[in-house]
Amino acid sequence: MPEPIIASTRYGDFKGTFSYNGHAGMGFPDLADLLNDMVDLGDHTLVGFEFNILGDNQGHHCYLTVFATDVARTPGEVEKYAREHSSVPVKKFRAEEHLQPADLLKLLNAVKEFCIVGAIRGSDMHLLQD
């Protein structure tokens, strides 16, 4: 049975959520083109992505994985498919080389808003009112 794709790390000391908005004038198709330059999706349509940054004694390496589907051609068609089905089947495409700092800068230039929230493993956070 297919498993949902969620953010995870080896130990998961912090887990949370992620949200991203493209820059004004740079929407989903532009992000798809940018990621397509890094990973060949063939005739599949981008539906998601994953960045992994792994560090060791020799430094850090950044990996890009792109999730794409062949059940629809446009973001609107993907959204329609998702409404009509319980999930969207995807394939995983991984960039053959580590991302370089210049590649990350290209992606950051496409960001209007970017938010990551992490919480200590196993804890829910509730903001108290002043």
Image (cartoon, rainbow, N blue to C red):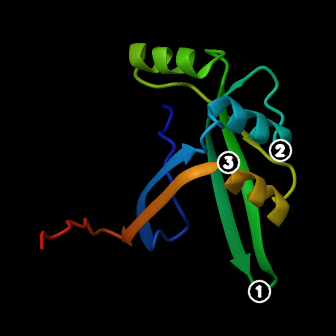
Residue drawn at x 69%, y 70% as measured from the top left: 54
Q: Give the labeled residue for mark 3.
A: 110
What is the spatial separation of the Cα atoms under label 1 and label 3, in whole angstroms?
Answer: 31 Å
- Which label belongs to residue 57? 1
The answer to whether residue 100 of the structure is visible from this angle is no
> The residue under label 2 is which amino acid type?
Met
Q: Looking at the image, which is closer to me, 125 or 21?
A: 21
Marks 1 and 2, how far apart at CA: 26 Å
Q: Position of residue 89 (x, y in %)?
A: 56, 25
Answer few, some or many: residues within 10 Å of disc 2's Cα (few below 14, many 20 plus, some between 14 and 19). some
| Callout in the foreground (1, 2) | 2
The reply, left or right, for residue 109 in relation to residue 75 is: right
Left or right of 14: which side holds 5?
right
Which residue is at the front of the view, 52 or 25?
25
Q: Residues within 10 Å of mark 3 (few under 14, many from 20)?
A: some
Please tell me whether mark 1 or mark 3 is closer to you in this view: 3
User: What kind of residue is marked 1?
Assistant: Asn
Q: Quadrant of residue 123?
A: bottom left
Q: Secondary structure at mark 2?
A: helix
Mark closer to the chain start, 1 or 3: 1
Front disc: 2 or 3: 3
